[in-house]
Image (cartoon, rainbow, N blue to C red):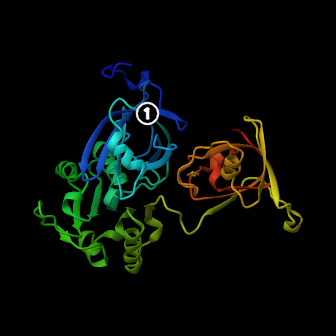
Amino acid sequence: MPPHTVRHLDEMLPWNDKLQMLECIAAVEEAPDVMTFSFRTPDQNWFRYAPGQFVTLELPVSPEPAMRTYTLSSTPSRPYSLAVTVKAQQGSVGTRWMLDHLRPGMRIRAYGPAGDFSLASHPDGKYLFISAGSGITPMMSMTRWLHDCAPATDIAFINCARRPDEIIFHDELRLLAARMAALKLSFIAEQSSPRHAWSGLHGRIDRTRLELLAPDFNDRTVFCCGPEPFMRAVREALQAMGFDMARYHQESFQPAAETVVTPTSPAGDDPGAMPQTATVRFTRSGVEVECGLDDTILLAARSAGLKIPSACEFGVCGTCKVLCGGGETVMNHNGGIRDDEIGEGYILACCTRPVGPVEIDI
Ligand code: FES
């Protein structure tokens, strides 16, 4: 379809949560080693997602494709395209490939969207969005959404960066704040930058700075995203000040300390009687493999020479969702699958183990 064809939403099909091809339509530099990539679909679908959700991209790096999960920085209130804003950390392979090679006109595969780190899941009238580095992306998605759909919303927006020139979306946030009377921006930089005059706060987030920048934090629902040490500092400061942590939400693509254990089918009563291996049959491929009870379905598939797409491999991104056609399994996930999907028989292959013979629909 020619890029300038104008179609209306009611003439277009929505993007769904199955495998999709995305076409890059823009690559924009935001800060050092940070770029925003915007996409549409070749058939011009519209994008249905909640602000703050993520997608998993299949990046064609060598020797084999890498799956990487990125929070969307775009807002579903502008549904003709979506965007991720990515930062290449030292040693990065997938994100570095995007920065160096992904350009308008190229196509990549995407899975999603998924995740419940969204004001759609935790609605309120007052928010504290607190982020560090590229953790600003879900906050940007939610702030853009509120600008478009509820511009009077009260938002205390705090972003922490190593240096002032590394603050992502700085100029756009200032424009948004000029149009949203109750959006209060605060930036904290750890170090000075020789090229930027800096009148904001210096240092790292702590209880004193939090109280200074959001004195009414107790009235707000908190969304926090950034490296784990940063999120830990925020959690500890809030806890020390008596904040109700049921109103604290964070996004992390690292394993959580606790997982949700979901029996996806009844297990046997007598563990002593259970065999130490189980047969996993991949029905569409016609392949059968014997695996240990400690092995995941993902590992069993790999040992059988089959590929199930995966990214995080600890049950958060949902990329490895497959249909279990029968048998006994136990799933230890971290929120990457919905209850209704479990009810329909889906499992996350990376965190599901067989208890007995199992059939998987791949
Ligand atoms: S690979 Fe992310 S949930 Fe399985």
Q: Residue furthest right?
A: 273
**Element under disc 1:** strand
Left or right: 324 in relation to 48: right
Residue at x 40%, y 76% (from the top left corner): 236
Which residue is labeled 1 in the image? Answer: 22
* Residue 281 falls in image quadrant: top right
Position of the N terminus, as image quadrant, is: top left
Res. 149 visible in picture: no
Q: Residues within 10 Å of mark 1 (few under 14, many from 20)?
A: many
* Name of the residue lying farthest toward the front: 63
**Quarter of the picture holding the C terminus:** top right
Answer left or right for 18 relative to 286: left
Q: Which residue sits at x=45%, y=70%?
A: 245
Asked if residue 141 is positioned above or below residue 331 in the image, the reply reads: above
The residue closer to the viewer here, 240 or 251, is 251
Q: Please tell me which residue lies in front, 30 or 259.
A: 30
Q: Position of residue 318 (x, y in %)?
A: 56, 48
Is residue 253 shown above or below 110? below
Closer-to-camera residue (227/102): 102
Q: Position of residue 216 (x, y in %)?
A: 30, 70
User: Residue at image x 47%, y 48%?
Assistant: 68
Amino acid type at circle 1 is Leu
